[in-house]
Amino acid sequence: MVKLRLNGDFIEVREGIKLSELLGELELPDTRIAVELNKDVVRRNDWGETVLRNEDVLEIVHFVGGG
Amino acid sequence: MRFKLTCSAFVLPRILLDSEKVKITWQVGELKLAGKEFGSRLIIGTGKYRNFEEMKTAHKASGAEMVTVAVNRVPLDGSTESFLDHLDPSMAILPNTAGCFDAEHAIRTARLAREALETEWIKLEVIGDKITLLPDNEQTLEAARTLVAEGFIVLPYFSDDLIMARKLLDAGCPAVMPLAAPIGSGLGVQNPANLRIMREQLPDAVIIVDAGVGTASDAAIAMELGADAILMNTAIAEAADPGKMAKAMRLGVEAGRLAYESGRMTKRLYASASSPIEGAIR
């Protein structure tokens, strides 16, 4: 298992999991969201090739009301 | 006889109606911003509405062509709902960096917004203090420089200060967005002199008053001082009837702009009679 920090919370996922697989398991939409891995944006096209590693820090964002 | 005289008074408007042949063409000009043209000089927020229906009604009534949205962590409990689906697709979306307290977080948020929405436009907001929500101008400038270099169209929220406005424009921002008063305060333009000075010293800059407007007269005042547009959220969302307030804001912005463009009369300390005093019976 690898330990990740996702939106501030610690989670454990299986070894070798790809970012696209994690997003699928979280049932997140694949449009109008963005993902940052260790403070760098991961382009949508790279989600399928990005393997998550121990102690990776992920931020996944969408849009909410604001002013 | 007296009745007939009273009746003749009703004839007067008919004479005035001859002027209806003159077509009224005085309309508020378009807002030109970063190569785009907007028919409305009102930009509105999407926060604090009691429900989506009220927000949609207000957006429609406002006539705004651009709305701002916030970037936020997705909930991980499967409750994700796309907020953007509740927005009129004809409106441009301006993501913001609200909630960021330093340049680094604002820059990261802007990059995420660009990736998610495929837009270069960003409302840059770097807050310096949780109580006042006043902007951190130094961090804002730093973030603006980086984001402009990365190709963003940066619209920065900042304190109403001429020197800061100059620096932000020099950094490559296509517009500056000085506050009228603290975010969500509804206090109206607290320092009209600063806005006026900014307008006079930066005649070619696009100045968008962002934050602090409370009601339609506040919007009119900001526009009369020479603002090119106003961005607001709370004044509409927290009104008892947001739709009606949105319409009032639309009219306030238009009235203020027309008044600014028309060139107001000079204020004088003493009266100046509108009717001739000479020739009045003695």
Image (cartoon, helix red, strand yellow):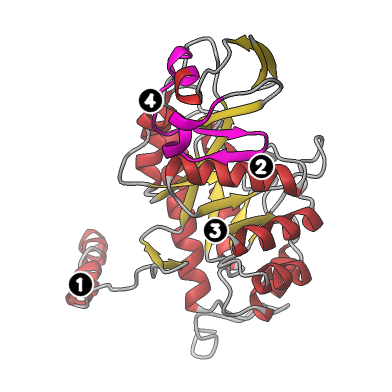
Name the front one of labels 1 and 2: 2
**Res. B7 visible in picture:** yes
Give the residue type at disc 3: Phe
Give the residue type at disc 1: Glu
Looking at the image, is mark 1 or mark 2 earlier in the sequence? 1
- In the rendered image, which residue does mark 2 sit on? B186
Residue visible at 63% across and 81% down?
B266
Which quadrant would the N terminus of chain B be assigned to in this image? Answer: bottom left
- Mark seen at residue B53: 4
Looking at the image, is mark 2 or mark 4 earlier in the sequence? 4
Q: From the viewer's perspective, is B177 left or right of B27? A: right
Question: Do the CB atoms of the residues marked 1 and 2 lie less than 8 Å apart?
Answer: no
- In the rendered image, which residue does mark 3 sit on? B152
Q: Is residue A47 above or below residue B28?
A: above
Report, in whole angstroms, how far the alpha carbon at label 2 lies from the one at label 4: 23 Å
Q: Bounds of the magenta span?
A: A22-51
Residue visible at 57% across and 10% down?
A14
Q: Chain of mark 3?
A: B
- In the rendered image, which residue does mark 1 sit on? B20
**Res. A67 visible in picture:** no
Report, in whole angstroms, how far the alpha carbon at label 1 lies from the one at label 2: 40 Å
**Residue B232 picture location, percent across and down:** 56, 46
Give the residue type at disc 2: Gly
Q: From the viewer's perspective, is B200 left or right of B237? A: right
